[in-house]
């Protein structure tokens, strides 16, 4: 196999080593069979009188065949023989799509017979797979040059990343404009707005965590703890003291920042993996305290009846209490339940933008530069007289504060919170958004949140397969862009800015 | 914070006086009762074979290790005397004004060259930014402090000849340039004493020539004390005003470069014991190179 690969590298038209290609495909088919036998082969079915296990021989064989053919196509592609792959895979994929869509549009055509599997989603995956192979083959034929090295690709992607980063001063406002206009678009229904609110919540959390992980380089696996502290702070303050959202919001942030400092102190000496484990433990501790401190937090029952935010004191309800006005009455509008969603949307948009502007600003301040220096080399920081303790604690506190704001928003949006909302998977998702977006990249977080939260949420019909796609997306990005989608760091000060700063005011001349 | 000295420094005019410094790691005595002084506007070199304890002395001076015994007194020209052995690591750089570089370069590789020099002025900028609060709102005090910091950074960029690389990531610089940048970064902390740990290691002859000129310029123009660990004898002999020789953690010689070069104890440490005299000179030199 290796010899075939080596020769193909030198001349793509060398004769195909059929036996070894078949052998390799056979091995893959065998492995696929072994996996599919257990995973696909047995299906528990409801029968009268209990569950029965049915063996699905056809599907196991189909999966094995797909493994064999897929591997063979891959070998062909690797050896520069894109043409046969393109002519088989493209029509097959197209036929699959036609067969899947056929019953919807042309029931008479009886296209169902081309459908390979019983499960709709698996069929779609197969179709996409085939089209992907075909498309790749076509692309190779089109470009002829299949010999692009990984380094060259990495470099090209870096250039693209840098270009997007450069363009972010235009892309950013453009995205913001789109975000502002979104609720007024004709296609913006309640579902889309709900998804947008969710995405923006994660964007905000991603930006908050970006301070801790992206800037200060402190790997935090327990970020959801601060989210929980913020949510519970708001909920408890609002329920016990009858305070409004706007009064409680700063408190929720302060409480979360305090929790951040609380976490920060014991982990000051830890770095890397050890830090990650302790933060993970902290996240779980907070969740378990919330779960078990029944008198205070109502434990697993959760807190309900959390007040909704008001628009400058005007509630967004259909029937306000006696003597008060609600939003639609004040502005003389027809009551619409979407108004509240739009209000929530703008609220989280504003909170997220505050997080973003704060981060962009603080990056250029001494403390932000010290965070980045700390990420780069803690020992060098100490040798320059930077206090690593205070620098780390501020990073934890400020990152946690934004998590707390996000939590307060979550509580007011849901109206109900329970410890179940603050499990480790939330921390993992937020961290994935930061890492996949490219550590320290603000706009990368937006793209990653849309990719990881928005798309799976949009394709909720696909049920558990969306988590499969989530995993696949993560693996793909990590293979394709190990440092994240947009991992390009823009210096906080450039020489021209420095010269401008230096020239402004009275030119002080050279320092001693 | 800073610890004022209880008694006057023993040596007159000494910027730094190290008295009876000992460091033990378990049973290993890394530095054993070493005393020396370093004066400002002078380059003091610490030399010795590998494992002699030179870097350990540096790590004590800059707060990375706590000495087992001894007294490290630094006389800051404007702030009075500091006892370095009682100060926490980063305070030594922050308050006492001791800056250092590292044997294996420790820049902030992903940050730009200019940023590296501005980060070094963290404490001054932090105070001016009102511990971030005023800075967030762009106060005038902070803007002026930032301008001052940028001026100093540009000045040092020019001095080390890296102005045209200012926006590049520090990690992408050539090795020699990284060495120069690390020295400039240390200078940006406005130190009274600069500690350089093998600044010429890995430099080619042209680069090490540039380095010696830079160090002499720092000594003469910035009027600070320079403490230097170095293996390149031509660099040491060329620029040092005062040489301290360590071997197996003990000080074996102390004096002007010429005096140290002729000291039999130093020759013994570098070239071996008396019985080596029977060997042909080139063999003796080879053994010496192996040890050093």
Image (tube, coloured by chain):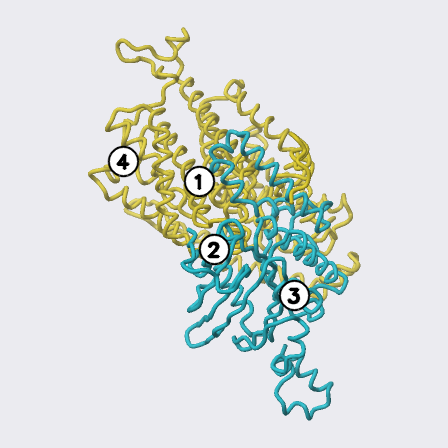
Chain colours: A yellow, B cyan
Query: Which residue is rendered at x = 30% and y = 44% of the image?
Result: A48
Q: Residue at x 74, y 64 (%)?
A: B204
Q: Chain of mark 4?
A: A
**SS for callout 4:** loop
> Mark 1 and mark 3, same subunit?
no
The mark that comes first in sequence, 3 or 2, is 2
Q: Measure how far apart labels 2 and 4 are at the Cα level.
A: 60 Å
Residue at the far front in the pictured view: B12
For label 2, the residue is B81
Residue B275 drawn at (x, y percent): 63, 92
Measured as percent of width and height from the top left, residue A161 is found at: 64, 41
Query: Which numbered circle lies on residue A302?
Result: 4
Name the subunit of mark 1: A
Q: Which mark is residue B241?
A: 3
The residue lying furthest to the left in this view is A295
Mark 1 vs mark 4: tell me if same chain: yes
Figure quadrant of residue A14: bottom right
Q: Do labels 1 and 2 touch, CB within 8 Å?
A: no
Query: Residue A399: which numbered mark, if any?
Result: 1
Q: Residues within 10 Å of mark 3 (few under 14, many from 20)?
A: some
Judging depth in this view, the residue of B182 and A151 nearest the camera is: B182
Give the left or right position of residue B206, taking residue A265 as reference: right
The quadrant of the rendering that contains the C terminus of chain B is: bottom right
- Quick one: SS at disc 2? strand
Chain on which label 2 sits: B
Q: CA distance from mark 3 to mark 2?
A: 23 Å
Q: Is residue A35 above or below residue B28?
A: above
- Residue A117 in view here: no
Neighbours of disc 4 within 10 Å: few (<14), some (14-19), many (20+): some
């Amino acid at each position: 196999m290796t010899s075939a690969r080596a020769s193909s590298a030198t001349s793509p038209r060398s004769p195909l080593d059929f036996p070894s290609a078949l052998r390799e495909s056979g091995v893959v088919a065998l492995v696929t069979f072994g996996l599919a036998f257990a995973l696909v082969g047995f299906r528990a079915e409801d029968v009268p009188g209990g569950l029965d296990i049915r063996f699905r021989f056809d599907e196991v064989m189909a999966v094995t065949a797909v493994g064999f053919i897929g591997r063979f196509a891959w070998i062909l592609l690797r050896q520069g023989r894109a043409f046969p792959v393109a002519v088989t895979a493209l029509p097959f994929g197209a036929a699959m799509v036609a067969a899947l869509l056929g019953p919807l549009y042309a029931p008479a055509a009886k296209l169902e017979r081309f459908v390979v599997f019983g499960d709709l989603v698996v069929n779609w995956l197969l179709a996409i797979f085939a089209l992907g192979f075909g498309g790749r083959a076509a692309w190779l034929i089109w470009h002829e040059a299949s010999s692009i090295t990984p380094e060259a690709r990495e470099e090209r992607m870096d250039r693209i990343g840098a270009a997007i980063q450069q363009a972010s001063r235009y892309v950013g406002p453009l995205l913001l404009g789109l975000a502002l206009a979104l609720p007024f678009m004709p296609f913006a229904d309640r579902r889309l707005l709900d998804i947008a609110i969710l995405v923006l919540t994660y964007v905000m959390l991603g930006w908050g965590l970006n301070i801790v992980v992206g800037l200060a380089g402190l790997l935090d696996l327990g970020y959801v703890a601060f989210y929980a502290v913020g949510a519970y702070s708001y909920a408890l303050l609002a329920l016990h003291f009858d305070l409004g959202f706007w009064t409680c919001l700063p408190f929720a942030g302060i409480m979360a920042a305090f929790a951040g400092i609380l976490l920060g102190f014991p982990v000051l000496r830890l770095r890397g993996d050890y830090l990650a484990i302790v933060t993970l433990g902290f996240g779980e501790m907070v969740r378990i305290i919330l779960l078990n401190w029944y008198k205070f937090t109502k434990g697993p029952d959760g807190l309900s009846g959390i007040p909704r935010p008001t628009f400058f004191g005007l509630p967004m309800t259909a029937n306000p209490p006696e003597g008060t006005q609600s939003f639609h009455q004040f502005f003389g509008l027809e009551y619409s339940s979407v108004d509240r969603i739009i209000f929530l949307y703008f609220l989280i948009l504003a909170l997220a933008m505050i997080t973003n502007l704060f981060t962009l600003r603080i990056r250029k301040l001494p403390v932000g530069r010290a965070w980045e220096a700390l990420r780069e080399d803690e020992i060098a920081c100490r040798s320059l007289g930077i206090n690593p303790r205070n620098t780390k604690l501020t990073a934890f506190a400020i990152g946690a504060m934004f998590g707390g704001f996000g939590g307060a928003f979550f509580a007011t949006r849901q109206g109900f919170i329970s410890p179940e909302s603050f499990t480790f998977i939330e921390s993992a998702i937020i961290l994935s958004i930061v890492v996949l977006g490219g550590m320290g990249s603000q706009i990368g977080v937006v793209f990653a949140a849309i990719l990881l939260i928005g798309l799976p949420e949009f394709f909720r019909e696909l049920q558990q397969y969306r988590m499969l796609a989530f995993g696949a997306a993560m693996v793909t990005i990590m293979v394709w862009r190990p440092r994240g989608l947009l991992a390009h760091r823009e210096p906080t000060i450039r020489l021209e800015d420095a010269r401008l700063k230096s020239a402004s005011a009275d030119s002080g001349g050279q320092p001693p | 914070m800073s610890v004022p000295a209880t008694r006057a420094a023993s040596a007159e005019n000494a910027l730094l006086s190290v008295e009876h410094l000992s460091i033990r790691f378990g049973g290993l005595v890394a530095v054993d009762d070493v005393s020396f002084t370093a004066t400002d506007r002078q380059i003091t070199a610490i030399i010795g074979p590998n494992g002699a304890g030179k870097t350990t002395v540096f790590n004590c001076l800059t707060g990375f290790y706590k000495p087992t015994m001894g007294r490290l007194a630094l006389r800051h020209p404007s702030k009075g005397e500091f006892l370095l052995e009682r100060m926490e690591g980063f305070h030594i750089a922050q308050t006492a004004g001791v800056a250092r570089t590292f044997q294996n370069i420790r820049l902030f590789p992903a940050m730009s060259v200019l940023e590296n020099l501005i980060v070094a002025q963290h404490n001054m900028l932090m105070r001016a930014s009102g511990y971030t609060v005023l800075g967030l709102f762009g106060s005038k005090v902070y803007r002026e402090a930032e301008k001052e910091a940028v001026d100093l950074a540009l000045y040092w960029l020019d001095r080390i000849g890296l102005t045209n690389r200012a926006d590049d990531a520090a990690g992408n610089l050539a090795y020699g340039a990284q060495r120069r940048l690390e020295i400039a970064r240390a200078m940006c902390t406005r130190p009274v004493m600069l500690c350089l740990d093998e600044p010429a290691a890995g430099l080619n002859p042209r680069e090490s020539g540039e380095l010696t000129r830079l160090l002499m310029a720092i000594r003469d123009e910035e009027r600070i004390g320079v403490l230097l660990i170095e293996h390149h004898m031509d660099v040491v002999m060329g620029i040092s005003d005062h040489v301290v020789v360590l071997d197996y953690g003990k000080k074996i010689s102390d004096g002007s470069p010429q005096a140290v070069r002729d000291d039999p104890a130093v020759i013994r440490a570098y070239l071996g014991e008396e019985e080596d005299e029977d060997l042909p000179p080139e063999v003796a030199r080879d053994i010496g190179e192996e040890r050093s």
